[in-house]
Each structure stands twice: as C-alpha cells, then as structure tokens.
Image (tube, rainbow, N blue to C red):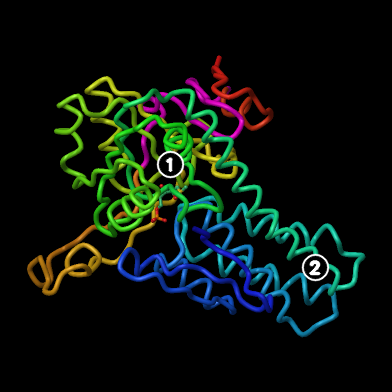
Amino acid sequence: MKTIWLDDAGSAAVIIDQTLLPGETRELRLRTPGDFHDAILRLAVRGAPAIGIAAAYGVYLAAKALDTGDYGAFRKAVADHCDYLNSSRPTAVNLKWATDRMRSVVENNSSRPVNEIISLLLRECRMIGSEDAEMCDGIGRHALTLLRPGMGVLTHCNAGRLATGGIGTATAGIYLADSRGYGLRVYCDETRPLLQGARLTAYELARAGTDTTLICDNMASFIMSRGLIDIVFTGSDRVAANGDAANKIGTLSVAVNARYYGIPFYICAPSSTIDFGCPSGDAIPIEERPGYEVTSMWYDKPMAPDGVKVRNPAFDVTPAELITGIISENGIASPPYEESLVGLAGSKRDPGARIDGG
Ligand code: MRU
C-alpha cells in the first residue's frame, strides 16, 4: 500500500484519495499547488508525515512548471509556493519541516542553473519519502521491545501506512510484532468526527491480517476497565520541546483514561515531528474545522438542530506528564522530555534503548 508517488511521466504526484476509503480505492493526480493545497485541506492525503511528503512533491512540481531561468525570480516563486502549501493545515509540523527542506535546496544552490536545482528538488522529495519509511521502521523496532504476545493495543486516529511513507508510526510496532506471530489484539478508536480510525486504521490493519476491533471513541474507557488494553500507541502531529504532544482530537481523553487505569501511553513520532522551536503545547496551533463535519457530513440527514453552535477542533494536546514515553526512530525518550528529546534527536540507539531525561 503506497501513500504517494510520482507518475511515470513525472508530471503528477499520485495519491489514494483517503476521503473515499474504505469503500473506494481511487487514485488522484495532483499537479498544481492548488491541487496539493486542496488535497491536504480536505484530507485526501493526511497524517503528519504524508502531508510533508505530499507538500514536497507539490513544491517540486510547482518549481518544474516555473518558466524562468532567473535564480532570483525562481527562488521567490518557490518560497511563495512553500508559504501557500504551509497554509493548508497548521498543526502538523512535518508540513513546514518538508517545505523548509525544499526551500533550503534552492537557497543552498544559488550558483547552479535553475534546471539543475529542479533535479536536486526531485532528489530531495524522494529522500523525504524514503527517509520517512526508514524512520517508521526505526520506530517499529523500538516499539517492538515494549510488546509481548497476546497484548491488547489501543490506537487512535490513523498513524499507519496511509499517514506515512512507510509502515506507519503507531502501527509500526504492531506490524513488526504480528509478522513475528505475536497475535496482538488491536482496538481502533473510530475517531470522530472524520472517522480515520474506522475508515483507515481498521481497514489497513484488518487487510494486513491483524486481529482488529473497532470501537467508538467513548467506549475506550470501558474497554480499558475490562483489562483488555495493555498499552496505547498513538501518533503525533507536533511534539513540543517539553514533550507535550498534539494529536488527533480525542487523544487527550485516551491518555487521561490510560493514566486512570495504569496503562502505559506512548507517542510514536519520527524526529521530523519534534518541534524544538515550540516550547510547550500552548504554542501549538490547533486547526479548527467546519461544523458540518460534526453535524451532517456522514449522515443522510443532519444529526443536530439547524443553527446549533458547533466546535470542531481537529487536534488536542496531551501534556507530557501523561506520556509514558516518546518513541522515535532513534530510541524511546522518557521524562523529563526537555533533556531526553534532545538526546533522541542527536543519536541512534539500539532497539528499545531508553533515553532518560535529567
Ligand atoms: O487529521 P489527520 O487525519 O491528518 O490527523 C492525523 C493524526 O492525528 C495522526 O495521528 C498524526 O498525523 C500522526 S500520523 C503518523
């Protein structure tokens, strides 16, 4: 299952339109910055790392379409395209992280002709994709050290293959464990209001042969209370320097419930999701989406009175104190995260290695 790739002619990025899954698997070809902005905004491609990879291809194709050999004009136009793509979704830091990498390619090669810079941009977006796949594998190796045969794992939203260039972040350990015959029991929160858990995670895990059970978000505490969950793995859209982590709305209640029932709660996130420029969760921008996603989007007729006030924050922030550990490709960071995340960013560790803060 590939999330995003360049077509044979090299003139469009191809994605599976995730708004149509699981009922329909339809490829969508993205060519212009407007195509990419729209696909990211309406979640045809979603999940922090996948958004970053898509945006990188968007920058490459926009740069390729520019009709100029003048470096100054080229650089300005690429920077404008990056800013435009960055405005599509505010919470996932991987978006800006990826467009910054593309922008740096242009800025660091000012002495080269524009056509050479365009080739370097193509190389960079391919690298962003392949590095993401490697980071997922690394997260999986570390997460695997926390798993035992027969465990019950709860996950929220989709931090799986569809959200990344590889085997996912929250799902990476699950895939590796099940390929070794662990027989995990995975519970997927449906993830109101856009149902990424039901439509995407349950779909991809069941397709891979994992024992998958779908629950509504408000059933998670009951399932925990019955002793069915041994560990929680979720993804993140942005981890602040102090370890506070933004993820899909509802993650915070999962973390609070997990603490109540004494269940370890782990954030699985590549280093591209750690934002050292963001001191704490208070500084993470939280996307607000339209109310119809809550009231009517999935229903034949509206399920709320006309004109009722609706809030639809797409993400929440789990405070560091509720997070048992942050699993990245370089190891598992433990609190206090101010120190351990810095250690994590700077080094590769053996699978399962703990990087303790303080
Ligand atoms: O709104 P979405 O579907 O883009 O939200 C996705 C999530 O919250 C994921 O958990 C997060 O981006 C990490 S994906 C590896």
**Which residue lies most toward the right here?**
111
Q: Is residue 207 left or right of residue 283?
A: left
Q: Which residues are magenta?
A: 317-339
Would you call the spot at circle 1 few (<14 residues within 10 Å), some (14-19), or many (20 or more)? many
Q: Is residue 344 above or below residue 240?
A: above
Secondary structure of the residue carrying numbered label 1: loop
Q: Is residue 219 above or below residue 88?
A: above
Residue with the mark numbered 2: 119
Would you call the spot at circle 2 few (<14 residues within 10 Å), some (14-19), or many (20 or more)? few
The front one of 340 and 87 is: 340
Q: Is residue 185 magenta?
A: no
Q: Is mark 1 within 8 Å of ligand 1?
A: no
Q: Is residue 133 left or right of residue 72?
A: left
Q: Position of residue 36 (x, y in %)?
A: 53, 72
The residue under label 2 is which amino acid type?
Ser
Q: Position of residue 197 (x, y in %)?
A: 31, 51
Of the residues under marks 2 and 1, which one precedes in the sequence? Answer: 2
**Which residue lies most toward the top here?**
358
Q: Is residue 318 magenta?
A: yes
The front one of 198 and 34 is: 198
Residue with the mark numbered 1: 171
Image point (42%, 36%), residue name: 178
In the picture, residue 276 is in which quadrant?
top right
Q: Are marks 2 and 1 in contact (CB under 8 Å)?
A: no
Q: Position of residue 44 (x, y in %)?
A: 42, 67
**Which residue lies most toward the front here?**
181
Marks counted in the figure total: 2
The residue under label 1 is which amino acid type?
Thr
Q: Is residue 197 left or right of residue 136?
A: left
